[in-house]
């Protein structure tokens, strides 16, 4: 019966060929580590977000008068298990960025953005931007004080664009301040367009991966034939390891959901939005703090801060063209100079994240400025490192 | 050049492409327009207020674009400020503290605006005189029509004030 159905489908959809190409005969190298499971984890978290999102959507009301109570009363108190889905959705959004940072950090450390994987890096970058937009629009929906003022502050940034700025910000908000029109359009983007685009770019990302294949710890270029000979198939070998990582991850995830969800629920956001009163301190969620700190880092000039803020988010897109050194200078494992730069960059990113939450005064203001410069310093150092490594490669390499 | 005439197929291609571009432009324009503020929002963006209804020494609060606007008819003992005075005797300022956006209170006996959040003080002209506020209270764009002030439109008096 089962075989007959598969045969029937196969004649019409060629499903066995599809399965072979995508899963059973898609090979990965053996010299990879647990960090290579972060990609599938992002998909897992995305699925968790979609499923929990659908359930909170069933009771959520996108109206400035109703939104706050629909979340904090209806979903949290009245709907059976409504609180589970709300906490899963909030924690899921936070953890998505943790997994994304690990995934991107892996890509940077092992040089997975370098030729021929530029499209993988670019689509991945677009996915990061889309995910940020989804998180930002979603954060407004509970209509609490922090939701409201985060949206107010970030949309105000658009008003600083020369000439069109003041009109643009009114157009984005649909009002002179963040109001009902802003809430409903953010809601529409959050539940339809942005997730749809994420799905589309995930498909392109995975398609590109099937063409160029996974990188490996040593950055050794491998043809498909070499991988078939020396590697492991995605299904069932890689995925069985992935299932193990997934189960460990889910323990951690649901531990957070049930016992430590407060990091994803700011207390200020349990006060309804009030457009006549700004909370004393406005700060974004932890995953945007580093970029926010670059904005504040140039404390002596608003214009420089804004330019820095935009650049800090755009510059990672150009990694494949800033760092052009050839094999064997792919993985940081075999690039001493790059390895130092990478760890300085990671430490700097963490420092920016911590500084983003501290008041921007005195010493912290200067530290923020220095950390912002170091952030850009990493990207600007790459062409220099590439030049040195190219010379080494020409004179016989380091190995 | 004359030899390279546009073939029938090219012509159809250009015509179809052009027509499709017109259609696409129309669609994008319509989408753009849907995000504009609704007529009711735009109407509330321009507020008219008759200044003569404010008694000397009295403060009235007008709501404009989701913000409180303080209209104060100053008496001579409140001091003067040539560059921040509307129609000779009024202070018209956005009632949002320039420090962190709280709403200051008008203290009649001291004749100052005092912010309850961090203790910032502004004189009757809206100029910061004490505490953390970095600059005076903002003056909203306005136009004068006789004794009526139109908030949200810029008139010559406002432009002169901004230049001075």
Image: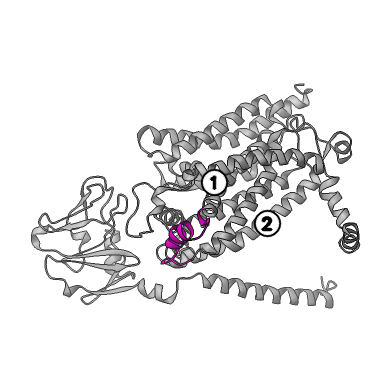
Instruction: Please report contact status of discs 1 and 2: CB closer than 8 Å, yes or no.
Output: no
Which residue occupies the extreme top position in the image? A399
User: Which color scheme did the rendering employ for the protein?
Assistant: one colour
Residue assigned mark 1: A94
* Closer to the camera in the image, A280 or B86: A280
Question: Horizontal and vertical percent for residue B41?
Answer: 40, 72
What residue is at 59 percent from the left and 44 percent from the top?
Answer: A315
| Secondary-structure class at tag 1 | helix
Question: Horizontal and vertical percent for residue A349?
Answer: 53, 36
Question: Horizontal and vertical percent for residue A281?
Answer: 37, 46
Residue A68 colored in magenta in the image = yes
Confirm whether residue B162 shows in the render. yes
User: Against B2, is A101 above or below?
Assistant: above
Question: Horizontal and vertical percent for residue A142?
Answer: 46, 58
Q: Quadrant of residue B51?
A: bottom left
User: Against B104, is A383 above or below?
Assistant: above
What residue is at 40 percent from the left and 54 percent from the top?
Answer: A149
Residue A199, numbered circle: 2
* Closer to the camera in the image, A155 or B51: A155
How many residues crowd mark 1 within 10 Å: few (<14), some (14–19), many (20+)? Answer: some
Quadrant including the N terminus of chain A: bottom right
Number of numbered callouts drawn: 2
What residue is at 48 percent from the left and 41 percent from the top?
Answer: A294
């Amino acid at each position: 019966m089962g075989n007959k159905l598969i045969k029937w489908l196969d004649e019409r959809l060629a499903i066995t060929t599809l399965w072979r190409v995508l899963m059973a005969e898609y090979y990965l190298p053996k010299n990879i580590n647990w960090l290579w499971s972060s990609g599938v984890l992002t998909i897992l978290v995305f699925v968790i977000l979609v499923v929990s999102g659908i359930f909170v959507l069933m009771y959520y009301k996108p109206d400035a008068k109703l939104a706050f109570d629909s979340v904090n009363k209806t979903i949290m108190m009245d709907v059976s298990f409504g609180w589970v889905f709300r906490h899963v959705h909030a924690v899921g959004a936070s953890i998505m960025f943790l997994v994304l940072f690990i995934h991107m950090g892996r890509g940077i450390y092992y040089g997975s953005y370098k030729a021929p994987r530029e499209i993988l890096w670019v689509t991945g970058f677009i996915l990061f931007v889309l995910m940020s937009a989804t998180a930002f629009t979603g954060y407004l929906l509970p209509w609490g004080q922090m939701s409201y003022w985060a949206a107010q502050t970030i949309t105000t940034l658009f008003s600083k664009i020369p000439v069109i700025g003041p009109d643009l910000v009114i157009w984005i908000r649909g009002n002179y301040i963040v109001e009902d029109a802003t809430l409903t359009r953010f809601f529409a983007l959050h539940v339809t367009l942005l997730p749809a685009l994420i799905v589309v770019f995930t498909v392109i990302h995975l398609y590109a991966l099937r063409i160029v294949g996974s990188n490996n710890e040593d950055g050794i270029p491998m043809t498909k034939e070499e991988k078939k000979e020396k590697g492991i198939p995605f299904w069932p070998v890689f995925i069985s390891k992935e299932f193990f990582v997934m189960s460990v991850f889910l323990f951690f995830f649901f531990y957070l959901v049930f016992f430590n969800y407060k990091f994803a629920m700011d207390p200020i956001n349990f006060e309804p939005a009030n457009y006549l009163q700004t909370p004393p301190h406005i700060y974004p969620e932890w995953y945007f703090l580093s970029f926010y700190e670059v904005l504040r880092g140039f404390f002596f000039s608003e214009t420089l801060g804004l330019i820095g803020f935009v650049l800090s988010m755009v510059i990672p897109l150009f990694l494949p063209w800033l760092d052009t050194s050839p094999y064997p200078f792919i993985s940081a494992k075999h690039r001493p100079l790059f390895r130092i730069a990478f760890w300085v960059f990671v430490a700097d990113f963490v420092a920016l994240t911590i500084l983003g939450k501290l008041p921007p005064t005195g010493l912290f203001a200067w530290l923020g400025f220095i950390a912002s410069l170091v952030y850009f310093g990493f990207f600007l150092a790459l062409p220099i490192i590439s030049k040195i490594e190219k010379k080494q490669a020409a004179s016989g390499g380091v190995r | 050049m004359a030899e390279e005439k546009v073939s029938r197929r090219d012509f159809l291609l250009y015509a179809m492409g052009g027509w499709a571009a017109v259609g696409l432009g129309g669609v994008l324009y319509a989408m753009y327009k849907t995000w504009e503020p609704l007529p009711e929002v735009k109407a509330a963006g321009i507020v008219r207020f008759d200044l003569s209804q404010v008694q000397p020494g009295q403060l009235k609060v007008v709501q404009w674009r989701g913000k409180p606007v303080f209209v104060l008819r100053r008496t001579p003992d409140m001091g003067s400020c040539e560059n921040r005075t509307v129609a000779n005797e009024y202070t018209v300022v956005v009632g949002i503290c320039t420090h962190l956006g709280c709403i200051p209170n008008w203290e009649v006996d001291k004749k100052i605006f005092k912010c309850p959040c961090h203790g910032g003080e502004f004189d009757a002209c809206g100029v910061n005189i004490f505490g953390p506020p970095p600059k005076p209270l903002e003056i909203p764009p306005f136009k004068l029509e006789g004794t009526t002030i139109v908030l949200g439109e810029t008139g010559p008096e406002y432009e002169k004030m901004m230049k001075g």
